[in-house]
Amino acid sequence: MDSEFLDNDLLAANVLTYAEDECIRLSQYYLGTEEILFGLIKEKKGIASKALNYLGLSLKELDLEKWIGKSNTSYEKNERPTYTENAQLVLNLSSDIARQRGDKIIDTSHVLRGLAYASFEYESLKCRRQPFSGTILEEYFINLKMINQVLDYKIMGKELPEKDFDAINFMNRGIIKKTKKNYKGAISDFCKAMDLDPKYESSILYRGVNLKDSGNTLFLIEDYLLEIKYKEISVNKEPSLLEQFKGL
């Protein structure tokens, strides 16, 4: 582990403690980027956790036991996990990013930026494979641009203005509204995502889910018509979508 990293910011150090504890709980010998992502979310006082929550990723979604399972490593007292090359790369990138930005300490935002860069620019960094954190982030439609964008606004104590939203931003906000049972707001955001990118199949799918949950049959039929209108997109490979319109 990078001692320079730990000497900087308490919250950033807590991220690694949470990551190591989760690695030990799952009896994993190696600590990877997915555990660092877990630690970033769990340190709720950090700006990285707030940014990830804003993007729709919380501890509820990031159940690492479901993602990677449990192993059979036994730890001795005071023994800590071994960091993978990719995990160490994230820490090194965090230090580099802090220096490049002229910041005197490394906080959770630098760690998240380093994690995101390693997750999505792994080929340019000559990683042998994409860090697993990248797989998780992509599952929730989160990319490097979005992370940097939201962090920039969170650091200023502001929310990302809607005028700067792209289709993915609207869809992610819609997903958050869905979890809070704000179906009307979720539907509105998915419609906006569709306006920006009519072929954005995930927005159609999630709109269908939200509309079904809200019991809005009229709009379910409208979504069915939209699905036909954009029938050339890959969402047609999703049988679950059409299943939602049966029996109306």
Image (spheres, rainbow, N blue to C red):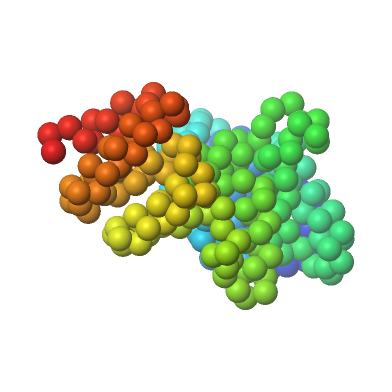
Q: Is residue 35 visible?
A: no
Q: Closer to the camera, 194 or 125?
A: 194
Q: Single out the residue that lies furthest toward the left.
A: 247
Residue 19 x/y as whole percent: 59, 50
Residue displayed at 29% across by 37% down: 225
**Is residue 231 placed above or below 223 in the rendered structure?**
above
Q: Please state if 98 lies on the left or on the right of 185 as rendered.
A: right
Q: Single out the residue that lies furthest toward the bottom.
A: 157
Residue displayed at 43% across by 39% down: 202
Residue 49 x/y as whole percent: 56, 61
Q: Single out the residue that lies furthest toward the front.
A: 229
Q: Closer to the camera, 171 or 155?
A: 171
Q: Please state if 239 lies on the left or on the right of 121 as rendered.
A: left
Question: Number of callouts in the render?
Answer: 0
Residue 123 x/y as whole percent: 76, 31
State which quadrant residue 176 falls in: bottom left
Residue displayed at 12% across by 34% down: 247
State which quadrant residue 137 falls in: top right
Residue 187 x/y as whole percent: 34, 55
Residue displayed at 87% across by 59% down: 100
Q: Quadrant of the C terminus?
A: top left
Q: Is residue 229 visible?
A: yes
